[in-house]
Amino acid sequence: MTSVHIAQNFREADEALQARGFTRWNFDLDRILALLELMGDPQRSFRAVHVTGTNGKTSTARMIEMLLRAHGLRTGRYTSPHLDSVTERVTIDGDPVSQERFTQLYNEIAPLAAMVDEQFEESLTYFEMTTALAFAGFADAPVDVAVVEVGLGGETDATNVLSAEVAVTTPIDMDHMQWLGDSLESIATMKAGIIHEGASLVTASQPRDAMIPLVERCHERGASLVAQGRVFDLVERDVAFGGQQLTITGPSKSTYEGIFLPLHGPFQAQNAAVALAATEVLLGAGEPKALDADVVGEAFSQMTSPGRLERVRTAPAVLLDAAHNPASIRALVEALSEEFSFRRLIVVFGAFADKDVSGMLELLEPVCDHIVLTESLSDRALPTATLERLAAEVFDEDRVTAAAHLPDAIEAAVTLAEEGEAAYGGAGVLVTGSVYTISEARKLLVRD
């Protein structure tokens, strides 16, 4: 029998989870189902909205949860990865669980997890454990609805034990090809796996190759299809001070005008349209229900999305964005060009080795005056020396600086921006490339 370690504090619980392999993935549901059965199947005690896609999942999940809470429901939200603490992954009524509560939940699950580990050749992963912990917390609260973000893919993801009544797909693009397949169709097929019998699928606009598997899965499972551009849409979008002003038509055919969203970029406007559609569908129990426009407007006006074009410093301005693949970099560049008037932009860039780094650099080159290359502390980070070789194929030598440690990279970028501010005016710094780069940057730059 595997020994069971009872954590005396949050640090011990966090370390015990990390020891299971922070970046280790298993792609079958046997272990998580066995664990949840021992726990009494907490995932069956609440309604659920299940969110997948390539980009925008976390922001969309946050918006759905905010809208549901504004309409009087007690909510849980499970997203990943976290930026600062693992407690951010498990929120109840908008607030992360406390470290004490997280430790309690871990200690409740740990003995059962040890029993499951004995049954299988591979032990439960970090992600499987935090998923089970979240579901236990939601059941104990109890919550009315949980908004749950897929970890990776969909069909074989540990969260796909939910059989959620509303499935949501944000825009699908090429990413995680080593696990999900090397075509848009294969990636979309895996993500379509969260559509269950009799559910409703709310989907953002998709390329044809991604849309076909979603439609086919809906037909197979008798699920209703609620698609952007056919059933709901973003009707109008105007850049406004501190964010943007939106008009959205929901699946109920109600039009919500003058919505202020304090987030930047066309992609966040699309996320808002998808979130509103999903909320209408859930609150109408499958039949879209018109919502109170004032409640909707107030909820959106309170939205935050840490690490997504987040301004954390001024003079010079420092922005953090967790773009980590070409599709999200493309959206980032569009938002920068539209909403920020930097005359000189310094980019701090650190990415994972398994990403299309060359594609990301090529998209950044036209808007970047100087790039500072670095790496996060993650074991998946691309070494700075390798990043230099890739950048040399895209940037002129005099536009590239390398700093193996992120604090040094940020300091170098700020110095370059300050020099540019004196010479040109309107200089800024952007930190991007991976969620983990942003996580470490926030720890350096953001004070609670």
Image: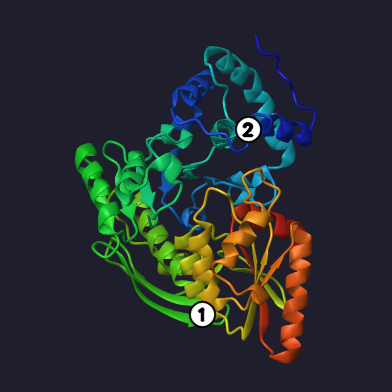
The structure's colour scheme is rainbow
Which residue matches tag 1?
Answer: 337
Which percent across, then down, holds residue 111? 65, 18
Residue farthest to the top? 1
> Left of 205 or right of it: where is 24?
right
Which percent across, then down, holds residue 353? 57, 49
Image point (71%, 59%), residue name: 442
> Left of 244 or right of it: where is 417?
right
Task: Please indicate, yes or no, whether residue 329 appears anywhere in the rendered image.
Answer: yes
> Left of 140 or right of it: where is 16?
right
- The disc, 1 or 2, on the residue closer to the chain's N-terminal end is 2
The residue tagged with tag 1: helix, strand or loop? helix
The residue tagged with tag 2: helix, strand or loop? loop
Task: Please indicate, yes or no, whether residue 447 appears anywhere in the rendered image.
Answer: no
Asked which quadrant contains residue 341, the reply is: bottom right
Residue 181, relative to residue 206: is it above or below?
Answer: above
Q: CA distance from mark 1 to mark 2?
A: 39 Å
Closer-to-camera residue (443/110) = 443
Q: Amino acid at mark 1?
A: Ser
Asked which quadrant contains residue 324, the reply is: bottom right
Residue 205, relative to residue 146: is it above or below?
Answer: below
Disc number for residue 384 = none
Which residue matches tag 2?
Answer: 21
Q: Quadrant of the C terminus?
A: bottom right
Image point (49%, 49%), residue name: 73
Image point (30%, 42%), residue name: 199
Asked which quadrant contains residue 277, the reply is: bottom left
> Left of 124 or right of it: where is 286?
left
Which percent across, then down, holds residue 323? 54, 60
